[in-house]
Every structure is written in C-alpha cells, then in structure tokens.
C-alpha cells in the first residue's frame, strides 16, 4: 500500500481512539467499546478523507486531478456523515422512544400476547457538524505531518544514493 493509504488509516485509527477519552470526559463513563462504534467526536470518516486529501494536495499539488477527486470525495463523505447519517440516527431515537411508549401502554392492558421484543436500534450513527470539523482538522494535521515525515524520508534516501 502507498503512504497516503497508511496515513489515512492511521488517521481513522487515531480518531476512533480519541473517542474513548473524549467520551469519558463528557459522560464520566469509561467505555472502550466506543472505539468500534460510529458517531461521536471526532469523525473518523472526516479524519480519513481529510488526511488523504491533504497528503495528495501537498504531494501532487492542488491543480491535479488526484487532488480534485479526493477533495470532492471527501466533501461528499463529510456531508453524508453529518447529514444523512445524522438524520438516520435522530429517526432511530424516535423509533426507539415509540417502542418504549408502546411497551408502557401494553403493560396496563391484561391482554396475553407474546412477541419477541424488538432489538433497540443503534442511535448514534452520524455526526454533529462540530464532530465532522474535529475529524477534518485532525485529518489535515495528520496529512501535513505525514507529508513532512515522508518528505524527510525521500530526502534521506536521495542522500544515501549519492554515496
């Protein structure tokens, strides 16, 4: 795999890892399982595409097709993360609360009815705009650092070839 892919995956992993302490400070609840969940601060989707776009822009240049494709792809991913996926999460919250209301209504009736209770839907799917922005900033930072690191790598390999 190329360095851009490694950096984007690193950025996604960092964003997911940061969710654990951020969740702890917000909710005072230690939950390492948020590493594997969707939603939350920062957005790993945004971090990954921002890293990729930043790295491509610095390595290949802004007027290239590579950068244009990555930028448009990244904007679509970030828009989707805070738009469609967030709306799906909010709809899920309403569906889950309706199930709780139906359960309360059914408790007051003495009708015998056995049905497997519905599984509660996952409520955190998308991101708030600030979570997307947080992921994008993390991604840009990883992209810049990754480019600087690989640039030093290239200079060192050129230096070694001369001797």
Image: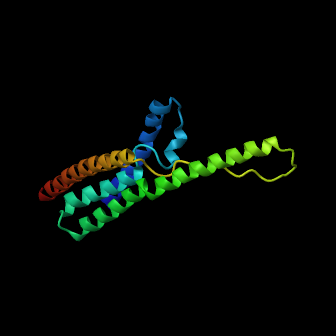
In this rendering, the answer to whether 33 lies above or below 119 is: above
Residue at image position (15%, 57%) is 158
Q: Quadrant location of the N terminus?
A: bottom left
Residue at image position (32%, 50%) is 136
99 to the left or right of 51: right
Residue 52 x, y percent position in the rendering:
31, 58
Please name whichever residue, 121 or 111, is drawn nearer the observer in this view of the structure: 111
Residue 134 x, y percent position in the rendering:
34, 45
Please name whichever residue, 30 or 157, is drawn nearer the observer in this view of the structure: 30
Residue 31 x, y percent position in the rendering:
54, 36
Residue at image position (22%, 60%) is 57
Q: Quadrant location of the C terminus?
A: bottom left
53 to the left or right of 110: left
53 to the left or right of 1: left
Residue 112 x, y percent position in the rendering:
88, 49
Q: Is there any visible trace of residue 86 in the rendered image?
A: yes
Instruction: Give the quarter of the image for residue 76.
Output: bottom left
Q: Give the number of callouts.
A: 0
Please identify the residue farthest to the top as the structure is shown.
28
Please name whichever residue, 146 or 127, is drawn nearer the observer in this view of the structure: 127
Residue at image position (28%, 62%) is 71
Please name whichever residue, 98 or 37, is drawn nearer the observer in this view of the structure: 98
């Amino acid at each position: 795999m190329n360095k851009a892919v490694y950096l984007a995956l690193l950025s996604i992993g960092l964003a997911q890892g940061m969710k654990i302490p951020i969740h702890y400070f917000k909710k005072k609840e230690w939950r390492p399982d948020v590493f594997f969940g969707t939603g939350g601060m920062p957005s790993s989707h945004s971090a990954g595409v921002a890293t990729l776009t930043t790295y491509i822009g610095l390595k290949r240049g802004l007027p290239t097709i590579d950068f244009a494709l990555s930028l448009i792809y990244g904007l679509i991913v970030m828009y989707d993360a805070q738009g469609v996926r967030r709306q799906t999460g909010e709809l899920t919250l309403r569906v889950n609360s309706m199930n709780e209301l139906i359960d309360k209504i059914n408790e007051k009736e003495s009708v015998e009815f056995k049905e497997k209770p519905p599984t509660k839907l996952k409520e955190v799917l998308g991101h708030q705009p600030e979570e997307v922005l947080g992921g994008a900033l993390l991604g840009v930072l990883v992209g810049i650092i990754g480019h600087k690191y690989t640039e030093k790598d290239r200079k060192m390999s050129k230096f070694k070839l001369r001797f």
